[in-house]
Amino acid sequence: MGQSNLEIKKYVAELIGTFILVFAGCGSAILAGSYIGNLGVSFAFGLSVLVMAYTIGSISGCHINPAVSISMLAVGKINAKDTVFYIIFQCIGAILGAGVLYGIRADGLASGAAITQLAQNGYGTAIAGGGSLLVALVAEIVCTFLFVLVIHGSLSKKAPKGFAGIAIGLALTLVHLVLIPITNASVNPARSLGPAMFVGGLALEQLWLFWVAPIVGGLLAAVVWKMLEPADSKEQTIEPT
């Protein structure tokens, strides 16, 4: 029973963390984007990960991203069962976060008006100035690779302990600065799923890219990290102490 309770706590922590990421990150874009711009939105996503790292990192590791969980599975830091349940609960959290934003957005529109903007990801004509399919695919793979590699390195035993959350949060900010003009920045399949479920249309049609690219990027990061990882290094959880 004790082990079961521990597992449930981990899964719920992942749900809460992903909820906060989508609610705060996407919320900053659709509710305050005209005031804070892409720089502010990038920091909102980064800060969401940073604060959740120090909140739930000691419980679940604060993956809040299927690409991260799959990468951790690839390097042997998480088992298959936890990977599956992490992804399920991450997706639930993302959908709930987008659902709350949908309700907030709907409250400010005329009755019956369609909601077409929830900071959903896309490429080409799906977003203003978006990159082509190939550009979006490459950019998402490269940026996810960078982001997840920072996660692996920051959690290394030899990395300064207690600073992983800061490095990871800033890495997410960095990749958002690059990706927002191209795809609205995903690097996280769950983050893409939530808004797409409510917006529909092109957001759902193009959702496949925002699952494939981050997972490929995360797996590439796992391969590279396994080559770079010091022999006596062991990843730690994201903890403030």
Image (tube, rainbow, N blue to C red):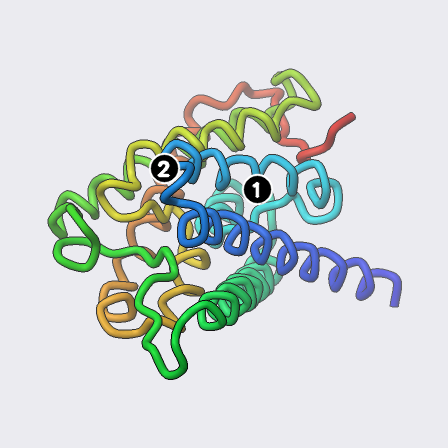
**Kind of residue indicated by mark 2:** Gly
- Dot 1 crowding, Cα within 10 Å, few <14, some 14–19, many 20+: many
Task: Tell me residue 216's x, y (percent).
Answer: 32, 47
* Of residues 98 and 104, the one drawn nearer to the viewer in this rendering: 104
Whole-number angstrom distance, CA of label 2 to CA of label 1: 17 Å
* Of residues 98 and 49, the one drawn nearer to the viewer in this rendering: 98
If the image is split into quadrants, where does the C terminus sit? top right
- The reply to whether residue 99 is visible in this rendering is yes
- The local secondary structure at tag 1 comes to helix
Compared with 35, 90 (above or below) is below
In the picture, residue 113 is in which quadrant? bottom left
At horizontal 47% and vertical 47% (from top left) the residue drawn is: 28
- Dot 2 crowding, Cα within 10 Å, few <14, some 14–19, many 20+: few
- The reply to whether residue 145 is visible in this rendering is no
Q: Residue furthest right?
A: 2
Task: Tell me residue 89's x, y (percent).
Answer: 59, 64
At horizontal 56% and vertical 55% (from top left) the residue drawn is: 18
Compared with 92, 209 (above or below) is above
Compared with 19, 166 (above or below) is above
**Kind of residue indicated by mark 1:** Ser
Task: Tell me residue 96's x, y (percent).
Answer: 56, 68
Compare marks 2 and 1 and give the one earlier in the sequence.
Answer: 2
Compared with 213, 84 (above or below) is below
Residue tagged 2: 37
Quick check: 226 left or right of 62? Answer: left
* Of residues 228 and 167, the one drawn nearer to the viewer in this rendering: 167
In the picture, residue 41 is in which quadrant? top left
Kindly indicate whether the residue at mark 1 contacts the one at mark 2 (C-beta within 8 angstroms): no
